[in-house]
Image (spheres, rainbow, N blue to C red):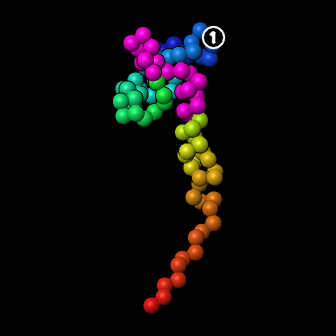
Amino acid sequence: MYEEITHTHEAAFLNLTKAAQYLGISPNTLYVWRHRRQGPPSFRMGGRVMYRISALDEWVMAQEQADSRSNAALNPLSQKPMKRAVRTP
């Protein structure tokens, strides 16, 4: 089983496998996102793909804010209905 990853001074950066574990997704998904230039920001350090834990947290928060189910301001059901345009013959 995977070891639990916590916010401690010992791990400011995570490799691809541990970042995927941290996000609760498969490493393959994170790999595909990286190559499509989607997903959380990453960088190379010593030839390895790394993710800053704070950047992962910020990326997750941005995803929550962009989702209408998590952000009431984006929920289309909370908007007033639009009036229909009047047709003129």
Q: Is residue 40 magenta?
A: no
Residue displayed at 50% across by 16% down: 14
| Image location of residue 85, percent across then percent down | 53, 78
- The x and y percentages for residue 81 are 60, 68
- Write down the region rendered in magenta: 43-60
Q: Quadrant of residue 44?
A: top left
Location of residue 13 in the rendering, given as x and y in whole percent from the top left corner: 53, 16
- Residue that mark 1 sits on: 9
Q: Is residue 43 left or right of residue 56?
A: left
Q: Residue furthest bottom?
A: 89
| Membership of 59 in magenta stretch | yes
- Where's residue 67, x and y in %? 55, 46
Looking at the figure, which quarter contains the C terminus? Answer: bottom left
Count of numbered tags:
1
**For residue 9, above or below residue 43:** above
Residue type at the position of mark 1: His
Residue at (56% x, 49% y) in the render: 68
